Image: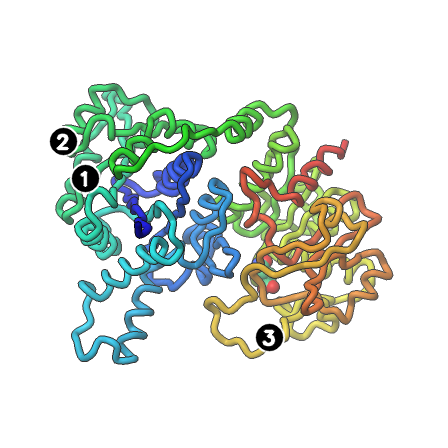
């Protein structure tokens, strides 16, 4: 029998930020636990080809996959929940759709036809959705449509969903619509009208949702479920409550209680499979909710006004905290506001310091001052990407005495370019998708912190950078105590630096945060948190 993939579409109404990504991830987790192979795809209705060129304040962090795709941060949730890699195919933007349609038009592929949103753009969208089923052979593909129904930008996606439902048939596809049921304190009531309106908007576009997930701060009574069901043509037991919870990791368990997975499988005419065994997940939650201790770590970066800008780092600390039976409290420190005369005051009392990745010179000096503070106070330190580069610059200036040492990213004329543009970046002029991206191997030095924590000799980690440690300085650095403990075996590029005489000082050129999941908390974060617990 040919393999049939079932498609689930997740749309959102009433407001943005209701947590479509978390609902999709939670449903996928339950279906996975029942024995199905599931993946999640995000369709983003903006014109950037990918979010790589976006300021993190626009849509939060840019997440990077194994194959080097710069993607929406929801893919990070998918990986953290499912413990499975995603790829470029899991994130499609309107920009990417238009780019390929226009490229085809220029090649003459449309044979003289007028190129239009319908059918050409919608065909391209449908092709990208189906690809995950036909090429990658998943049992179930969950496609999350970014934005809110009714937005002009979302229209071609909703139309594609309408067409796909018609083509695939109702037993092979399903629409879940996530909305908000606000509680009006003055009236003391939950209000369903916004949901009714947003379902009407979907209906105007020819799409009838099969399942409604209602985000709410108060429990939904039976009457509300019945009312919403009646006015939206949805069975009462397909009206699912999604009540506010403290941690996103509780949502799969809530959805299991609400039987979202069973409803979906029944509607798709699929066997229920095994009862989802979620013992490890529940054990993780139990530890998360009952920490035995607390530790405060400074997260130093320039995008501290928006926690989503460092989403994967925040989640990695949650995972690592659970392993260490502790709650990691993060103190967000804006590196743009760190000066020589206030650095001590801002970092005092911390048990560890993380200097975040970044680009450009704003907030850079504050990061270098931070590294100096961590090094001189023997405070556990983890520097990621630009954070690692700052640690090399600080050490060169203050220990090697190379005054003015810098990255050529910040100062092209520096007398000591200890961080320099990678050779293969020198002729790059376009900004989009041209960094060193995705997974590369790294060989670890025996006896290093890295080798002890990863417990293997070779690792693979994800990257997103243009600059690197200038190997011309590695010997000088080592002579004074900063050692390269991980290198790319093919190119010799320095991937990890450590200061062995320090309590715990690690800088990594790669991004460990992209690979931490609930099932596999990242060893470097786990050991970093462990080290912070030893600070009195
Ligand atoms: N701006 C630095 C580089 O391009 C660091 C990048 C980062 O932190 N992701 O090398």
Tell me whether circle 2 and circle 1 mark residues in contact (CB < 8 Å). Answer: yes
Identify the residue shown where x is 24% and y is 36%: 267
278, above or below 370, in the image: above
* Alpha-carbon span between mark 2 and mark 3: 60 Å
Q: What percent of the width, then of the height, locates residue 298?
A: 63, 41
**Is 358 displayed left or right of 209 in the figure?**
right
Identify the residue shown where x is 59% and y is 77%: 426
Identify the residue shown where x is 34% and y is 56%: 134
Give the camera-side residue of 109 and 95. Answer: 109
Can I make out residue 40 in this image?
A: yes
* Alpha-carbon span between mark 1 and mark 3: 51 Å
Local SS, label 3: helix
Local SS, label 2: helix
Residue at image mark 3: 424
**Is 316 displayed left or right of 185 in the figure?**
right
Q: What percent of the width, then of the height, locates residue 8?
A: 30, 44
Residue at image mark 1: 199
Quarter of the displayed picture in which ligand 1 can be seen: bottom right
305, above or below 196, in the image: below
Give the camera-side residue of 200 and 407. Answer: 200
Identify the residue shown where x is 76% and y is 34%: 535
**Is 339 displayed left or right of 148 in the figure?**
right
Image color mode: rainbow
Q: Tell me the number on the disc at residue 37.
A: none
Q: What percent of the width, then of the height, locates residue 143?
A: 33, 48
Q: Tell me the number on the disc at residue 231.
A: 2
**Is 459 displayed left or right of 87 in the figure?**
right
């Amino acid at each position: 029998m040919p393999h049939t993939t079932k498609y689930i579409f997740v749309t959102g109404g009433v407001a943005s930020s209701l947590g479509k990504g978390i609902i999709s991830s939670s449903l996928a987790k339950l279906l996975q636990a029942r024995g199905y192979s599931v993946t999640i795809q995000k369709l983003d209705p903006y014109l950037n080809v990918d979010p790589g060129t976006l300021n993190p304040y626009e849509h939060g962090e840019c997440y990077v996959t194994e194959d080097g795709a710069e993607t929406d941060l929801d893919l990070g949730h998918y990986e953290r929940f499912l413990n499975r890699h995603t790829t470029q195919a899991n994130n499609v933007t309107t920009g990417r759709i238009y780019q390929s349609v226009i490229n085809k038009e220029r090649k003459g592929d449309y044979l003289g036809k007028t190129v239009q949103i319908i059918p050409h753009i919608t065909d391209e969208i449908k092709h990208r959705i189906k690809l995950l089923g036909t090429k990658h052979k998943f049992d179930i593909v969950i496609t999350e449509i970014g934005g809110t129904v009714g937005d002009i930008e979302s229209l071609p996606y909703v139309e594609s969903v309408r067409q796909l439902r018609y083509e695939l048939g109702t037993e092979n596809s399903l629409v879940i619509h996530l909305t908000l049921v606000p509680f009006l304190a003055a009236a003391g009531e939950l209000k369903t009208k916004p949901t009714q309106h947003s379902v009407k908007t979907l209906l105007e576009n020819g799409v009838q949702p099969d399942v409604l997930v209602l985000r709410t701060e108060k429990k939904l009574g039976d009457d509300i479920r019945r009312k919403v069901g009646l006015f939206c043509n949805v069975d009462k037991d397909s009206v699912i409550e999604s009540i506010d919870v403290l941690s996103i990791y509780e949502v799969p368990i809530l959805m299991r209680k609400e039987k979202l997975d069973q409803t979906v499988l029944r509607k798709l005419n699929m066997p229920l499979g095994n009862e989802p065994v979620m013992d490890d997940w529940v054990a993780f939650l139990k530890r998360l909710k009952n920490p035995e201790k607390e530790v405060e770590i400074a997260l130093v970066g320039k995008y501290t006004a928006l926690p989503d800008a460092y989403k994967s780092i925040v989640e990695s600390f949650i995972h690592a905290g659970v392993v260490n039976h502790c709650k990691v409290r993060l103190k967000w420190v804006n590196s743009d506001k760190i000066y020589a005369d206030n650095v001590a005051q801002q970092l005092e009392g911390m048990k560890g310091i993380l200097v975040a990745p970044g680009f450009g010179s704003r907030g850079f000096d504050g990061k270098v001052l931070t590294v100096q503070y961590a090094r001189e106070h023997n405070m556990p330190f983890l520097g990621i990407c630009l954070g690692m580069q700052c640690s090399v610059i600080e050490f060169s200036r203050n220990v090697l005495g190379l005054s003015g040492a810098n990255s050529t990213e910040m100062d092209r004329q520096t007398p000591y370019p200890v961080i320099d543009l990678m050779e293969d970046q020198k002729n790059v002029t376009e900004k989009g998708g041209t960094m060193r991206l995705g997974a590369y191997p790294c060989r670890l030095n025996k006896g290093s912190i890295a080798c002890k924590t990863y417990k293997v000799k070779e690792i693979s980690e994800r990257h997103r950078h243009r600059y690197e440690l200038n190997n011309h300085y590695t010997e000088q650095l080592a002579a004074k105590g900063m050692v390269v403990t991980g290198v790319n075996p093919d190119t010799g590029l320095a991937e990890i630096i450590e200061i062995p005489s320090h309590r715990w000082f690690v800088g990594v050129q790669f991004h460990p945060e992209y690979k931490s999941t609930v099932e596999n908390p990242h060893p470097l974060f786990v050991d970093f948190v462990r080290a912070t617990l030893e600070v009195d």
